[in-house]
Image (tube, rainbow, N blue to C red):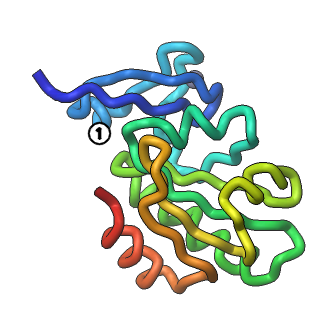
């Protein structure tokens, strides 16, 4: 018997529970039947955030804002990494303009800020954008 994992659906944000070995087998959501891994970062708001952040699957978060030049430059790097990092992690984007409560809760002082969270615990944080190779290295270093 393998370990069961809880992770939130990128589409309906409901929690799903599935055996760890099924993560790489293209699992679909029990509620909305859409793929649990979409190959793209997931935009989340305050209502959905907890389901993602409290899961067993690590989430890599990009705190960004539409007016931030470095954030816009980093967006394609982050987007490409989503397909590469799934199903080891889920990538989330939080627009700090729309979600000031989440930005305040994590005391985000500059953007972009990158963060890795699992089971509600912050595992790593980095202020500033990175080139693709360095970003992947940073994530690999901190993923459990
Ligand atoms: Zn769903």
To which residue does mark 1 refer? 24
Q: In the image, what residue occupies the spot 76% across and 58% down? A: 104
Task: Classify the position of the N terminus by image quarter.
Answer: top left
How busy is the neighbourhood of tag 1: few (under 14 within 10 Å), some, or many (20 plus)?
Answer: few
The residue at 74%/40% (across/down) is: 46
Q: Say if disc 1 is inside 8 Å of ligand 1.
A: no
Could you tell me residue 12's position as x and y percent?
64, 26
Image coordinates of residue 141 in percent, x first then y, are 31, 72
Examine the rendered structure and indicate whether residue 13 appears above or below residue 100: above
Q: In the drawing, does residue 21 fall left or right of residue 38?
A: left
Left or right, 65 with reference to 78:
right
Ligand 1: quadrant of the figure: top right
Secondary structure, mark 1, is loop
Location of residue 23 with respect to 16 vertically, above or below: below
Q: Nearer the viewer, residue 71 or 83?
A: 71
Q: In the image, 89: left or right of 12?
A: left
Compared to residue 86, the image places residue 19 above or below, namely above
Q: Quadrant of residue 17?
A: top left
Residue reaching furthest to the left: 1
Q: Nearer the viewer, residue 12 or 52?
A: 52
Choose between 43 and 101: the one closer to the eye.
Answer: 101
- The image quadrant where one finds the C terminus is bottom left
Residue 60, percent across and down? Answer: 51, 58
- As drawn, 105 above or below 12: below
Q: How many marks?
A: 1
Q: Position of residue 45 (x, y in %)?
A: 75, 42
């Amino acid at each position: 018997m393998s370990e069961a994992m809880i992770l939130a659906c990128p589409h309906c944000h409901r929690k799903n529970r599935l055996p760890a070995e099924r993560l790489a087998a293209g699992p679909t959501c029990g509620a909305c039947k859409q793929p649990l891994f979409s190959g793209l970062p997931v935009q989340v708001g305050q209502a959905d955030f907890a389901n993602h952040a409290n899961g067993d699957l690590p989430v890599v978060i990009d705190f960004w804002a539409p007016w931030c030049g470095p954030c816009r430059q980093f967006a394609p790097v982050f987007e490409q990494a989503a397909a590469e990092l799934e199903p080891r992690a889920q990538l989330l984007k939080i627009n700090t303009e729309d979600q000031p409560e989440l930005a305040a809760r994590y005391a985000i002082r500059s953007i972009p800020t990158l963060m890795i969270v699992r089971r509600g615990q912050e595992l790593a944080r980095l202020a500033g954008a990175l080139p693709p190779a360095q970003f992947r290295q940073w994530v690999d270093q901190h993923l459990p």
